[in-house]
């Protein structure tokens, strides 16, 4: 078993029942669950005005996206820098791209942020893997890539989106709330060593 995920109370109960309450972990992620009805999506002005665009990855962007996925894994998921990290990040980007679940925000032709759908059912998507390189943060690119991906999903009939973010990540919380997301619960993920 690599880990567990779910509402915090259920996660704690499952760990106790499985005898893993004291197991060594590499990540004990506490997050808030946000939800949004897509007809209430507030589109950021740079995206609405066309100063940035959002769409699926382009062929020449693969190496950039793999590097970003590695950085995301290190920063957000607490993974260690190992020789296999590039391979797993490449597989993840390729799979998300082939499933139509990867989205790139571009300023002109330059990629500036990434988002993905971790899960999808006919009327709902789960946003995840949102990443903006450190040198591009603070410009609203994360907010815009999420909004852009949701506009594309809404055009395909998706009506609702959910996502998780760490309780202490104030910048992400502000960005998601500015799009119209509201806290509807909590979530946790534990990854064992």
Image (tube, helix red, strand yellow):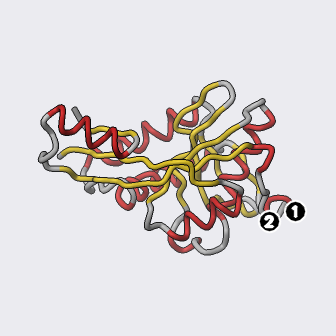
Measured as percent of width and height from the top left, residue 126 is found at 57, 40
In depth, the one of 118 and 39 nearer the eye is 39
| Residue at the image point whose x is 50% and y is 48% from the top | 185
Measured as percent of width and height from the top left, residue 125 is found at 62, 36
| Residue at the image point whose x is 24% and y is 52% from the top | 82
Disc 2 designates what residue?
Answer: 46
For marks 2 and 1, give the CA distance.
Answer: 5 Å
The quadrant in which residue 179 appears is bottom right
Picture mark count: 2
Measured as percent of width and height from the top left, residue 104 is found at 64, 51
Measured as percent of width and height from the top left, residue 59 is found at 62, 42
Q: Which mark is residue 36?
A: none
Labels 2 & 1 near each other (Cβ < 8 A): yes
The quadrant in which residue 67 appears is bottom left
In depth, the one of 126 and 7 nearer the eye is 7
Give the farthest residue toward the top. Answer: 122
In depth, the one of 89 and 186 nearer the eye is 186
Left or right, residue 185 beside residue 123: left
Left or right, residue 102 beside residue 151: left
Left or right, residue 165 beside residue 178: left
| Image quadrant where one finds the N terminus | top left
Residue density around tag 1, few if under 14, some if 14–19, many if 20 or more, within 10 Å: few
Give the farthest residue toward the right. Answer: 49
Q: Is residue 12 above or below residue 174?
A: above
In depth, the one of 88 and 180 nearer the eye is 180
Left or right, residue 93 beside residue 177: left
| Residue at the image point whose x is 40% and y is 42% from the top | 7
* SS at badge 1: loop
* SS at badge 2: helix
Q: Which mark is residue 49?
A: 1
């Amino acid at each position: 078993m690599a880990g567990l995920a779910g509402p915090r109370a259920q996660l704690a109960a499952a760990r106790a029942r499985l005898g893993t309450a004291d197991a060594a972990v590499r990540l004990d992620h506490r997050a808030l669950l946000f939800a949004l009805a897509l007809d209430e999506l507030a589109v950021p002005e740079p995206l609405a005005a066309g100063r940035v665009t959002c769409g699926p990855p382009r062929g020449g962007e693969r190496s950039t996206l793999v590097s970003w996925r590695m950085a995301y894994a290190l920063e957000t998921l607490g993974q260690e820098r190992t020789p296999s990290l590039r391979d797993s990040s490449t597989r993840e980007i390729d799979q998300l791209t082939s499933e139509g679940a990867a989205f790139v925000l571009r300023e002109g032709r330059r990629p500036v942020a990434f988002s993905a759908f971790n899960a999808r059912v006919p009327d709902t998507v789960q946003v995840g893997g949102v990443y903006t390189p450190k040198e591009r943060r603070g410009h609203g690119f994360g907010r815009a890539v999420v909004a852009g991906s949701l506009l594309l999903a809404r055009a395909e009939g998706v009506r609702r989106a959910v996502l998780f973010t760490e309780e202490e990540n104030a910048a992400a919380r502000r960005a998601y709330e500015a799009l119209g997301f509201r806290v509807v619960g909590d979530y946790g993920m534990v990854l064992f060593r």
